[in-house]
Image (tube, helix red, strand yellow):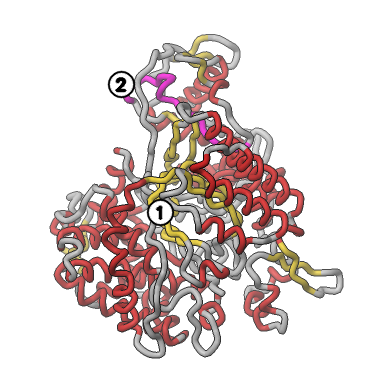
Amino acid sequence: MMRFSKRYLVGTFLVALASSCGGGATTSATSPDGSWQAALDAVPRGDFNRIAVELDLPLFWIDDADRDKTLDPAELSVLWGDPPARESDWVAGDAFTPAFKQAYAKIVERAQKAPSFAGLSPEETRRRTAVLRELSDGRPTLVASDLRNASAEDKAVVEHVLAAARIVEKLYQKQTGILSLASQVPSGDTASKRLFYRNQGPQCEAPATKDDPDCKAVPVALSRTSGIYPPALLKDPKFCDALAARPDGRALLEPFVVVAADEEGSMRPVPYQRAFENDMHAVSRELEAAAAAISDPNEGAMQAYLNAAAKAFRDGSWFEADEAWARMNTENSKWYLRVAPDEVYFEPCNRKGGFHVSFARIDQGSREWKEKLDPIKLDMEKALADLAGPPYAARKVAFKLPDFISVIINAGDSRSAFGATVGQSLPNFGPVANEGRGRTVAMTNFYTDADSIASQRAQAASVLCASAMETYSDEQAPQLMSTVLHEAAHNLGPAADYKVNGKDDVEIFGGPLSSTLEELKAQSAALFFADWLVERKVIDAERARRAHVHELTWAFGHISRGMYDQDKKPQPYSQLSAIQVGFLIDEGVVTWNAGEKAQNGKDQGCFSMKLDAFPAATKKLMGIVAKIKGSGDKKGAEALVAKYVDAPGAYADVRKTVTERWLREPKASFVYSVRR
């Protein structure tokens, strides 16, 4: 059974997907006592959105579409969250409501005067100051969907899926063990309340604040929490290994169970549907209601999945639900929905599936890549098998290439404090996964707005030399190609049901290292296959070169997140990025030029790239990684981490420089709006 996570994550880029048009501007706002206070051009758009976060207001200024520097009703988006916010509370027709005017007055007041911590203890003052710093390190970034012209049936489906998503958020907080801490957020402390919601817990996650002991959403001491392991176990930093070593370790570490302990310390697995029974049944009811709302004969596949997922939330039949889910595709539904426990990053042992919802509309743009790669899937498998060598042998692969989707909402484990998943292959467990019958998706409605493009270019220009920036592209195409190849590679080479001497990769490498290694394999394949496709004349060389520059900046972004989280748990994407960049430096493909200024003309020292040397270097790296996975070489995997991630010296200095420059730009903090 496969127990690694297969997710292609971008954590440093930004997106806003809303379009808007100018409307009749309301010319003034009122203070809470009702007096007129300020024109609606009193606060610039960026400050408005930043302060709305600090005040925990569900508001986002989409764009100054008419360039009058004044917020118009048509330019305002009301955000999805819990409790639900209604657009009618803030905008009525083409005018703002009194509630909005009061909120705007508060935003103006905050813009003119820093928050006061008078009367608070020094400790509380430090905490609240750190919270504001944490929030400022994320730029609220809108993912907007306009369903106002949708049919009544579609609107009903959306309402029930969104209702289920709110319950899934609660389920996920129960899994992480932080739900009970929400009541500890001080009354009136809007910034801490928003941090708790955004981060799905009290912990700070921005690189600059995640290790700050004062940075937390609650004024109480924090310790490791979990809703799926007994509290006594969490005191041992190696409890995952101890569980795995028990005679009943396999049962306790199954992906869909909670580990429960009685008073004597005896442990037993409890299925999710029993451990979280009330919430599981509540999700089930909403999914059944969504299915019942469907009468369109063209949406039979969606209806079948909703009913199968509803059943799984009641009885744990996750693999049955996977079968219904795998039968959905771009031909038989306009929707993409995944509601299940899937990814394992959230928990210390990397074994348990985290509850999440990913809800989207199908984008037909994936047809180009299906036409390119479908005929050569077996050749791709053979290419990796040749690099891996014995004992691995090429196998028949039957995976589906990524569908392109336009995200409506992410919830639970899919909703991150910073960044977002841009590609995903699911499920991670069971027959559908092991037989290569799962679904792979690439999220296409990210990184397309002007703010995102400018931010990415500024980051790249701060670390790349002018010669490297000549190949840098603002287009979305390089990122999409990398995502497609990354996700396809999760199904190629040593993956899924592959075992060495009867052991799967988690048993060989351990949960965290296996996750890092699998993501390293997939991203190394994205590098390797770009040039492989050029050799086969599937794409041209310039497309591959642009993709390589994108992939290097993608790696820089993940390096800036740090190699380990607050609990010293490895961050797979950060570590694979450090390994790849370090390897490319060793191979002379990427060079640090200390005497040359970066393309922005400000920063001293920059990276140049020998793009012609990429094919040989990436083939060599792919061979190393494929051999490690194919032979179960744990020492080889640990050696890569030791050299490129943990060792002090030149590689660490490079990461420090990249991190300092990359983090000048706030990180994406996604917010969602669904107009209906």
Q: Who comes first in sequence, dot 1 or dot 2?
A: 2
- Is residue 643 rendered to the left or right of residue 497? left
Q: Which contiguous range is marked in magenta?
A: 65-82
Measured from the top left, where is residue 126 in percent x and y? 57, 46
Q: What is the magenta segment's predominant secondary structure?
A: loop
Dot 1 alpha-carbon crowd within 10 angstroms: few under 14, some 14 to 19, many 20 or more: many
Membership of 398 in magenta stretch: no
- Is residue 663 rendered to the left or right of residue 321? left
Residue found at x 48% / y 15%: 93
Question: Could you tell me which secondary element the residue under label 1 belongs to?
Answer: strand
Q: Which amino acid is tagged 1?
A: Val
Residue found at x 63% / y 40%: 292
Residue found at x 47% / y 64%: 6
Tell me the distance, in whole angstroms, between the alpha carbons under discs 1 and 2. Answer: 31 Å
Q: Which amino acid is tagged 2?
A: Asp
Query: Pointers 1 and 2 in contact (CB under 8 A)?
Result: no
Res 126 visible: no
Res 246 visible: yes
Question: Could you tell me which secondary element the residue under label 2 belongs to?
Answer: loop
* Residue bearing mark 1: 422
Residue found at x 42% / y 40%: 141
Quadrant (top left/top right/bottom left/bottom right) for the N terminus = bottom right
Question: Which residue is the extreme one toward the right?
Answer: 263
Question: Which residue is the extreme one toward the front?
Answer: 297
Residue 66: image tag: 2
Membership of 77 in magenta stretch: yes
Residue 217 against residue 221 in the figure, above or below: above
Measured from the top left, where is residue 323 in percent x and y? 56, 61
Measured from the top left, where is residue 80 in percent x and y? 54, 36
